[in-house]
Image (cartoon, grey):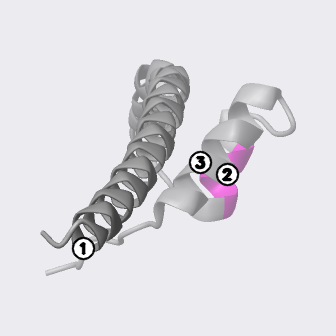
């Protein structure tokens, strides 16, 4: 029984892009890589179906960046508050030790 060939995603993308860009025709690509036209058509449909996800991922990264900036601001503010609390604590403890307390 013949074993099915497997192709890496990079190879599939390269072949589909060559077809879509018109560098080579689908028939040429199928002959060169020993592919059936149905396989190339399926790859192309998957490629085009997944294309919007690329732009959605961009938007997601933008939202994540905004969240990171917000969290960094919060960490900075909390660090300053902690420093103030430490200074106040040391001042109060030194005052109470002076007063014999």
Crowding at dot 3, Cα within 10 Å, few <14 / some 14-19 / many 20+, comes out as: some
The magenta segment: 28-32
Q: Mark 2 sits on what residue?
A: 14
- In what quadrant of the picture does the N terminus appear? bottom left
Residue 52 picture location, percent across and down:
48, 18
Contact, CB < 8 Å: mark 3 with mark 2? yes
Residue at point 76%, 34% (across, down): 25
User: Where is 74 relative to 63, above or below?
Assistant: below
Q: Nearer the viewer, residue 87 or 54?
A: 87
Q: Mark 3 sits on what residue?
A: 13
Residue at point 80%, 29% (across, down): 21
User: In terms of secondary structure, what is the magenta stretch mainly?
Assistant: helix
Gap between marks 1 and 3 measured at Cα: 74 Å
N-terminal label among 2 and 1: 2
Residue 21 visible, this angle: yes
N-terminal label among 1 and 3: 3
Residue at point 50%, 54% (across, down): 35
Residue 39 picture location, percent across and down:
41, 43
Q: Secondary structure at mark 1?
A: helix
Q: Nearer the viewer, residue 77 or 15?
A: 77
Crowding at dot 2, Cα within 10 Å, few <14 / some 14-19 / many 20+, comes out as: few
- Residue 30 within the magenta-colored segment of the rendering: yes
Residue furthest toward the front? 99
Residue 89 picture location, percent across and down:
29, 59
User: Where is 62 relative to 5, above or below?
Assistant: above
Q: Secondary structure at mark 2?
A: helix
Q: Mark 1 sits on what residue?
A: 97
Which corner quadrant of the image does residue 5 belong to?
Answer: bottom left
- Residue 66 within the magenta-colored segment of the rendering: no
Residue at point 54%, 26% (across, down): 62
């Amino acid at each position: 029984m013949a074993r099915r060939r497997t192709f890496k995603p990079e190879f599939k993308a390269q072949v589909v892009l060559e077809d879509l860009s018109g560098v080579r025709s689908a028939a040429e690509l199928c002959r060169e890589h020993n592919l059936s036209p149905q396989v190339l058509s399926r790859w192309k449909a998957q490629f085009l179906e997944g294309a919007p996800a690329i732009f959605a991922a961009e938007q997601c990264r933008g939202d994540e960046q905004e969240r990171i900036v917000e969290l960094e601001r919060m960490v900075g503010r909390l660090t300053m508050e902690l420093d103030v609390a430490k200074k106040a604590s040391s001042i109060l403890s030194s005052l109470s030790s002076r007063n014999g307390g």
